[in-house]
Amino acid sequence: DSGVTQTPKHLITATGQRVTLRCSPRSGDLSVYWYQQSLDQGLQFLIQYYNGEERAKGNILERFSAQQFPDLHSELNLSSLELGDSALYFCASSVEIQGNSPLHFGNGTRLTVT
Amino acid sequence: AQSVTQLDSQVPVFEEAPVELRCNYSSSVSVYLFWYVQYPNQGLQLLLKYLSGSTLVESINGFEAEFNKSQTSFHLRKPSVHISDTAEYFCAVSLSGGSYIPTFGRGTSLIVHP
């Protein structure tokens, strides 16, 4: 058990809809990362927060947004969903934001857009 | 920017045989290197890491990886695999200076046959 909790585990929704994915980081970790995993793109970095502030952005679409709350949990909002957004979305956390700090991953949220 | 190449998408092997999963990276600065393992329906878990010092690093379950700076490689090896080692393995690199966000390879599926 990594200590990172993601909800829900599965999400099925229709095109054009909006969903929210939730993540609670491991106790003591201040940094939260969001990754998208798909068969054709592999594991793609979306966005990272540290102690409530956005610190890095990756290949995140404008239709997607995220935030980290004062209690350090994070939410990833996906709107105007398209079929191509179907993927496994992972949250990860780390203690620090240096490159030598390994990530601890949740079990992911599997999003299916129909 | 750094990049990671995992040369094999799938590696089938028989139980108790040795295995090597290959990983090459590109970066113009010093790096930190990681191997993560993903079992079915789970998130990624850290297997081992190279931060500095000895170029040979080991995990608790018999895997080892060797950092080769001249070859820009970080191949993962195990002298004798078990059925339970069947999983997806990801190589990741982050920079010791500048961008600390880990970049992941596309993954290698290790399939151990009885």
Image (cartoon, rainbow, N blue to C red):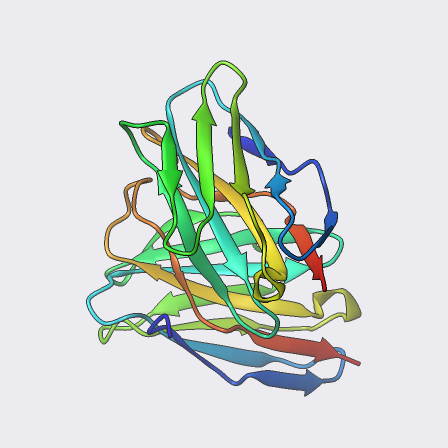
Q: For this view, does A35 lie left or right of residue B16?
A: left
In the displayed structure, B50 sits above or below A48; it is above
* Location of residue B32 in the rendering, given as x and y in whole percent from the top left corner: 38, 34
The image quadrant of residue B111 is bottom right
Question: Which one is nearer the viewer's eye here, A16 or B3?
Answer: B3
Q: Residue at x 76, y 53 (%)?
A: A40
User: Where's the C terminus of chain A, which quadrant?
Assistant: bottom right
Q: Which residue lies furthest to the left in this view?
A: A28
Q: Residue at x 57, y 50 (%)?
A: B80
* Location of residue A104 in the rendering, given as x and y in whole percent from the top left corner: 37, 61
Q: Which residue is drawn at 27% across and 63% down?
A: A52
Q: For this view, does B11 lie left or right of residue B31?
A: right
The answer to whether residue A61 is seen in the rendering is no
User: Where's the N terminus of chain A, which quadrant?
Assistant: bottom left
The image quadrant of residue B86 is bottom right
* Location of residue B40 in the rendering, given as x and y in whole percent from the top left corner: 61, 71
The answer to whether residue A34 is seen in the rendering is yes
In the displayed structure, A12 sits above or below B101; it is below
In the displayed structure, B88 sits above or below B29; it is below
Question: Which one is nearer the viewer's eye here, A48 or B109?
Answer: B109
Q: Residue at x 32, y 28 (%)?
A: B97
Q: For this view, does A58 lie left or right of residue B52?
A: right
